[in-house]
Image (cartoon, helix red, strand yellow):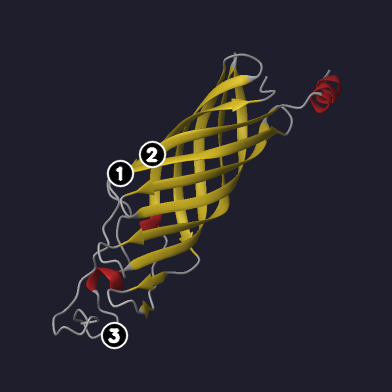
Amino acid sequence: MWLLSTAAFAADPVWGVGGHFGTSFLPGSYPIAFPPKIATYDFDGDGEADDVTGDGKPDQTTLTKVGGDFGFGFDGEYWLGHSYRLGVTTNFDFGTRFSDVGATIVFDRTIGLDRATVFFGGGLGFGNTVWRGTDPDERLRLPNYPLRAEVGTVLPVNDWIGLTGTLFAQMGIPARHDFTDLAGHSEDISGIPFPYTSLGVAVGGLYGHIQ
């Protein structure tokens, strides 16, 4: 019976393509914190905010945390047998003076519950996150590797269309920090991964052979 089931699955594979939209709701303002050198504007390490604009006064950042975002993206899934699936998800996320674009390869364990399918797993990808200041010269760009954990469900409408809901946690592991200060100068910035962690939710749909 196992051999017959495996052969049938291979001859008629389960797959789906679709899209999603959603938002991140934790932390309330993203990121949790900017790197210390940006928060203090002390780039020379003397313990005081620098005067990068040369007006005789200490400067401070005009970057602000994003408080509300809207994301959308496209998904592709391919089931590897009856209990696992491999997929790719892309995301385009926007907020006030904020953007995040990325793609992640995910690997999920799937469990069939009557007609619905529950999945949980995660993956790793690549992305680019940008915060822009109210000052037009100031910008923080963060090329990063998004590490993702997810849990969700696929609820089929019929054999070819399904609705999806996903709860996800994601940490952007920085490749580097590209920061331009108020005077348009590039500054050496270092940071640690945990401030770039978020928790979000997405809903969407899949089209394909999902049963």
Residue placed under numbered mark 1 in the picture: 68
Q: Residue at x 60, y 14 (%)?
A: 115
Query: Which one is closest to the eye, mark 1 or mark 3?
Result: 1
Q: Position of residue 40 (x, y in %)?
A: 23, 72
Instruction: Give the class, few, some or many, for how many residues have Cα within 10 Å of label 2's Cα (few <14, many ≥20).
Output: some
Q: Nearer the viewer, mark 3 or mark 2?
A: 2
Does dot 3 land on a helix, a strand or a loop?
Answer: loop
Residue density around tag 1, few if under 14, some if 14–19, many if 20 or more, within 10 Å: some
Q: Residue tagged by mark 3?
A: 44
Q: Is residue 143 left or right of residue 62?
A: right
In the image, what residue type sits under mark 1?
Gly
Q: Are marks 2 and 1 in contact (CB under 8 Å)?
A: yes
- Amino acid beneath label 2: Thr
Measured in 3D between alpha carbons, the distance from the residue under mark 2 to the one under mark 1, in whole angstroms, is: 8 Å
Secondary structure category for the residue under label 2: strand
Q: What residue is shown with label 2?
A: 23
